Amino acid sequence: MTEKRFDVERTALARGETREQVLDRNVAELLQELRVVLTGVQILFAFLLSLAFTARFPDLGAFPTVVYTVTLMSTALATVVLVAPVSFHRTVFRRHRKEQLVRFADRALLIALVLLAVSITSAVLLVLDVVLGRGPAVAASTVVLATALVAWYALPLRHRRTAAG
């Protein structure tokens, strides 16, 4: 978070909270968000790990194999990035670094959502390429990606600008 986006003192004053209350609330909110997102990523990751061991997988061809690799890697990276705030917290525990933890976790979650958008989009592309063919798969995965970008980034950014202006 940039200083403009996250000013603990300004938020505390506006909400009638202490600095510590703001940070505690932010940590609790981030933890809840991380739990929700991590569960979905873990389910997708487990599915992808098992997929390579199915009987049909070796016969998929080059394109599905590349899409599978992109999906697996983006999901693995999303998992690593989502778990990073836990490691950060353990490393700085009891060192009065809660504000840095909030900033780090915020960035990690935003990065993980980009990786998750790639994962979901490429998973849809992979499955629908096998089920419906390349054309419908590309069309459907494009809709999924566009929806994720609008819902996860464009609309929140628009509302943030509207609230700030």
Image (tube, grey):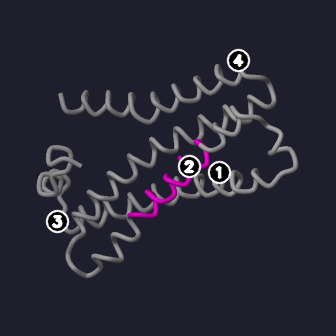
- In percent of width and height, residue 29 lies at 38, 58
Q: Quadrant of residue 163?
A: top left
- Check disc 4: other Cα within 10 Å, few if <14, some if 14-19, many if 20+: few
Which of the two residues, 126 or 14, is positioned nearer the viewer here? 126
Q: Which residue is mark 3?
A: 18
Magenta stretch: includes residue 72: yes
- SS category of the residue bearing label 4: helix
> Which mark lies nearer to you, 3 or 1?
1
Asked if disc 2 and disc 4 are in contact, CB closer than 8 Å, the reply is no
* Lower sequence index among marks 2 and 1: 1
Highlighted range, magenta: 70-84
Question: Which residue ends up furthest to the right in the rendered image?
Answer: 55
Q: CA distance from mark 2 to mark 1?
A: 12 Å
Residue that carries the numbered disc 2 in the rendered image: 73
CA gap between label 3 and label 1 equals: 40 Å
Name which residue type carries label 2: Met
Residue 135 tag number: 4
Tell which tag, 3 or 2, sits nearer the viewer. Answer: 2
Mark 3–mark 1 CB contact (< 8 Å):
no
Nearer to us of marks 2 and 1 is: 2
Q: Nearer the viewer, residue 123 or 32?
A: 123
* C-alpha distance separating marks 4 and 3: 55 Å
Instruction: Report crowding for label 1: few under 14, some 14 to 19, many 20 or more residues within 10 A (C-alpha).
Output: some
Q: Nearer the viewer, mark 4 or mark 3?
A: 4
* Rendering coords of residue 81 (x, y %): 43, 57
- Amino acid type shown at disc 3: Thr
- Is 58 or 108 nearer to us in this picture? 58
First-in-chain label (3 vs 1): 3
